[in-house]
Image (cartoon, rainbow, N blue to C red):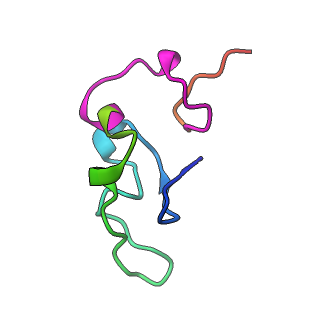
Amino acid sequence: MIKDVSGVFLTPGNYGKDCLGNGEHTNDVDELIECCCDECDYLVCCLFETNCTDCDEYDCPRKFHRK
């Protein structure tokens, strides 16, 4: 998993809909998790359709890992 500097686990892709850092999810105590998109290194993966097979980020949950 990709962990943001704030401790939020990021799931890039799918236009940011699944990412805990998109500003639409709450934490364990029902507080809104602040949006991480402005400083996210993976924002391009959420804004555009990307080819995950060409991605260099090994920890991404969407990454297709060849064996």
Q: Is residue 37 left or right of residue 2?
A: left
Question: Is 25 included in the stretch rendered in magenta?
Answer: no
Q: Residue furthest right?
A: 67
Looking at the rendering, in which quadrant would you find the C terminus? Answer: top right
Question: Is 54 included in the stretch rendered in magenta?
Answer: yes
Q: Residue at x 52, y 64 (%)?
A: 7
- Give the tally of numbered discs: 0
Query: Where's residue 27, x and y in %?
Result: 45, 74
What segment carries the magenta color? 45-60
Q: Residue at x 32, y 40 (%)?
A: 43
Q: Is residue 26 left or right of residue 60?
A: left
Q: Quadrant of residue 16?
A: top left
Q: Is residue 54 left or right of residue 35?
A: right
Depth check: give the residue in front, 36 or 65. Answer: 36
Q: Quadrant of residue 42?
A: top left
Q: Main secondary structure of the magenta part?
A: loop
Query: Where's residue 39, x and y in %?
Result: 33, 52
Q: Is residue 60 left or right of residue 11?
A: right
Q: Taking 4 as reference, is 43 above or below it?
A: above
Q: Residue at x 61, y 38 (%)?
A: 59
Depth check: give the residue in front, 28 or 46. Answer: 46
Q: Taking 46 as reference, is 21 above or below it?
A: below
Q: Taking 58 as reference, is 35 above or below it?
A: below
Query: Where's residue 10, x and y in %?
Result: 47, 50
Query: Where's residue 11, x and y in %?
Result: 46, 45
Q: Residue at x 41, y 81 (%)?
A: 30
